[in-house]
Amino acid sequence: MKNVVDVKELTKRFGELVAVDHINFEVRKSEFFGFLGPNGAGKTTTIRILTGLSKPTEGRVSVLGLDINSRIVEAKRHIGVVPEISNLYDEFSAIDNLLFMAQLYGVPRTQRRKRAEGLLKTFGLYERKNNLFRTFSRGMKRALTIAAALIHNPEILFLDEPTVGLDVVAARSLRNLIGNLHQQGIAIFLTTHYLEEADLLCDRVAILVKGRIIKIDTPKALKAAAEEESVIEFSFGREISELIEDLSNKLPEVKIATVDHNKLRIYGGAPTEVYDSVFSFAKGKGIKIQSINSIKPTLEDAFIKITGLSPIVMAIEKGGK
Amino acid sequence: MWRDSLRGIYYIALKDMRTYYLKPPSLSWGIVFPLAWILAFYLRNPRGFEELVPGLIAMTILFSTTAAEAVVINFELRLGSLERLLLAPISLPVVLLGKVLGGTIFGLMMTTVITIVSIVVLGLHPNFLYLILIIIPSLLVFSSLGSLLCVLVKEVFEAQTLLNLPRFIMIFLCGVVYPVSAMPTALQYLAYIMPLTYTVDGLRHSFSIASSTMVFTDTLVLIGFFILFIVPAIKLLYKKFE
Ligand SMILES: Nc1ncnc2c1ncn2[C@@H]1O[C@H](COP(=O)(O)OP(=O)(O)OP(=O)(O)O)[C@@H](O)[C@H]1O
Ligand SMILES: [Mg+2]
């Protein structure tokens, strides 16, 4: 078995709505694969199909070499899943939640407690092992949900936006933990709408927009594609969002995206021409230019170039669930 | 495969016992309600109370098995904990059977208590084999009926309301209080399409009180009802995960 996940022409419809539209990809052995896309792109729908919680409308999917339509139960023995929502049992303590999962997954009786306690230690929750799940902070809940997904030593771990709603510190520590898991050889399928997260963790990233995969590549290659053209960031003395259209008309061959209420980035075009146009535009409108930066493209810039979506789409955070 | 399934059913049932059934609301709904009901009848007519024992046991079976069904299914569907169970290497029927078994085990505990207390207090001599042949399938029937009604609806409160309907209709029509044979013919027909009638009939037989069919017939009919309820319940639950 070369690939741990193989997806061919996968489509999922909900009535009229096409949530996932003929996507193709594979996750290789021990690979860290990212699914990057804005809200409603179809990330969760895809993960639910891959983990047997939902049925494909069309297409073929195999996980660990097993067809999910006929042999999903077998496949689930070696799959770990961290759902979008931390859905362990509120009324169970941390250790009891893990022990229950161990029972369900058929971890041998003599190993259950040892494994559960080991995971609690790894995730820094050992001191709180007898506390009820509902008394945990959001970050602790997330961590325990990941621990629960690992109780049976899966070969592949699916994570649906694991760091949504966590503060910077908690998100960083969780990312470290996930990175460490990958170091140990476990394949990881992660969905996210944080570009930095995908950039930091993933070996390859699929960019998903409106149910379609627009591009699959390494973060490095995606950024290289963006580097082919210049990215210049301008800061203005005041709000400029209403004026963007005017500017676009002056510079038809470039892509303009707002970064902030008074900041915008211009992708592509010959730099001198861009400078000239923006200066004369600003002068004409009586707006001060506060600063100009030539930017090293981030994955975000690559994303904008590839998808044509404004970074705002990705920046509007869901605030957590 | 089989071992995985059985293990799944067992641990889900066990978990539900811990989290839902052995809690005050289920305990009171499962046992206090039938007791209060029967006490009312006893106070009205203390003599001939033996006649009411099959009805009391039948009611305990009915109420205890369905005591927490709405919570274990609809609530867990809402919270996503049912999904968590489905992430494990077990199939969806196994999850539902685990839920049904949880209700059955709880019902068995309640029913055993009520039965033994009745037998001891009233000095009765039932046929214990018959009792088992009736009580176990009945518990499965009403637990699966509860699960069927629960997957028919979305909300916990809808499920609870929907569950009350068959509960009360069956109490009145199935011989719990008045013998079926003493009812108008039209109602008798109605009684014979309801599972509780066969529970009461079989229990009456077990206590050597006049009954209409053989115990084995009652058992077979009850097993039929179990299949009739559990199969569509599984189908409907599959629909929720399409
Ligand atoms: N059960 C369902 N019934 C109907 N439509 C659904 C269902 N589940 C998802 N959808 C629709 O499918 C589309 C994709 O949703 P999905 O949850 O997969 O997006 P996502 O990429 O996970 O978004 P988010 O970042 O918000 O989690 C959305 O338009 C959503 O409304
Ligand atoms: Mg999602």
Image: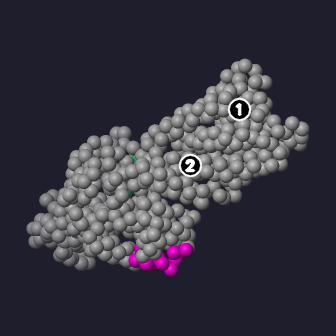
Magenta region, residue range: A119-130
At mark 2, the secondary structure is helix
Q: Residue at x 72, y 40 (%)?
A: B127
Q: Residue at x 44, y 74 (%)?
A: A114
In the rendered image, which quarter is residue A276 located in?
A: bottom left
- Indicate which disc residue B101 carries: 2
Q: Position of residue B121 (x, y in %)?
A: 83, 48
- Indicate which disc residue B166 carries: none
- On the question of residue A4 being in view, the answer is yes
* Kind of residue sitting beneath label 1: Asp
- Front label number (2 vs 1): 1
User: Do the residues indicated by labels 2 and 1 lie within the same chain of the protein?
Assistant: yes
Residue that label 1 marks: B201
User: Between residues A268 and A152, which one lies in front from this camera angle?
Assistant: A152
Q: Position of residue A16 (x, y in %)?
A: 34, 39
- Pinpoint the chain carrying mark 1: B
